[in-house]
Each structure stands twice: as C-alpha cells, then as structure tokens.
C-alpha cells in the first residue's frame, strides 16, 4: 500500500481465486494466491473489488463499484465491471483545481458551518427533466 491512499467503505481486496479449488488431479487441488499492489496517491471508490495480482499505479482513481481484474497504469481513472480506463488523472486534477472550492474558501467557526458554506446550493439543470 502506497502513500496518500484512500480506501472508501466496502472495498474488497481479493487475494485468492477460490474457483481453482474445483480442479484437482493426482497431485491434488490447485491454488492461486496473488498480492495486490497499490501505488501512491490512489483513491479506491466505495464497494470496488480488486482481484488477485492487480497492480494500481501511482495517481490512480478507481470508480465506485468497479471490479478491477487487470493492472492499471500510472495516471489513469478506471470504472465499471470489469474496470476500463475512463479518464486521465492529470486532466481531472486540472478541472478540480480550477472549479472546486478549497479549504480556504470555507467560512464558519464549526465544521458544519464550514461545509455548509461550500455545499452546492442549487440543483444541476442537466439533471432536471
């Protein structure tokens, strides 16, 4: 596990493949155990599943509910089941830094007041029909 990694609730790190136990011969059952590697500056969204042997590079975002079956290179955003590349970390970083409020924008004495001061107040028109 790298530095500055956020693992949201419900994330599963599956380091074995239980289906291989179904296969046996004179030498016995078969097993697969593989480590999962997580780089630096990674966010893993709620209920994501990382499968055996997966490597997440540095500056990677895994979308909520994704099933990561293959390794993810540095600087990518993946989502879906199975997870596929859907974006670029650096592009999202520029957009977030330009448009999202910062800690310096917060106003208030209590944490609640500070959060309330930056909460989006109106409905997004593109969602209203």
Image (cartoon, helix red, strand yellow):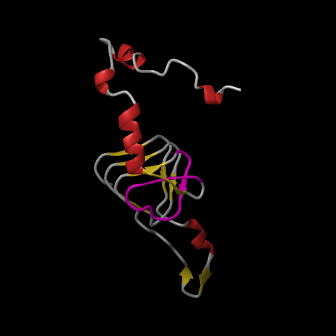
For the C terminus, which image quadrant? Answer: top right
- Residue at the image position 41 percent from the left and 20 percent from the top: 118
Toward the viewer: 111 or 90? Answer: 90
Residue 29 sits in quarter = bottom right
Identify whether 21 is placed above or below 113: below
How many numbered dots are placed on residues in this image?
Answer: 0
Q: Which residues are magenta?
A: 64-80
* Residue 123 drawn at (x, y percent): 58, 22
Task: Point out residue 91 in the picture as x, y percentages from the top left corner.
Answer: 41, 48
| Magenta: main secondary structure | loop
Is 109 on the left or on the right of 80, as rendered? left
Q: Quadrant of the N terminus?
A: bottom left
Hey, which residue is sitting farthest right in the picture? Answer: 129
Q: What residue lies at 58% left-to-right and 88% top-to-bottom?
A: 26
Residue 104 location, quadrant: top left
Q: Position of residue 117 (x, y in %)?
A: 39, 16
Residue 127 lies, in percent from the top left, at 64, 29
In the rendered structure, does residue 76 fall within the stretch colored magenta? yes
> Residue shown at 49%/72% (left/top)?
32
Q: Looking at this view, is 91 or 18 the one in front? A: 91
Quick check: is 121 in the magenta stretch?
no
């Amino acid at each position: 596990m790298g530095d500055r990694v956020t693992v949201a609730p419900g994330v599963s790190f599956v380091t074995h493949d239980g289906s291989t136990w179904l296969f046996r011969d004179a030498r016995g059952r078969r097993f697969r155990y593989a480590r999962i590697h997580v780089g630096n500056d990674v966010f893993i969204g709620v209920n994501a599943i990382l499968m055996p042997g997966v490597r997440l590079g540095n500056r990677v975002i895994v979308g909520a509910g994704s099933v990561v079956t293959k390794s993810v290179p540095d600087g990518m955003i993946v989502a879906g089941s199975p997870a596929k590349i859907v974006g670029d970390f650096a592009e999202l970083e520029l957009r977030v830094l330009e448009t999202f409020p910062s800690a310096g924008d917060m106003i208030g004495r209590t944490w609640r007041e500070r959060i309330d001061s930056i909460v989006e107040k109106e409905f997004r028109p593109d969602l209203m029909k």
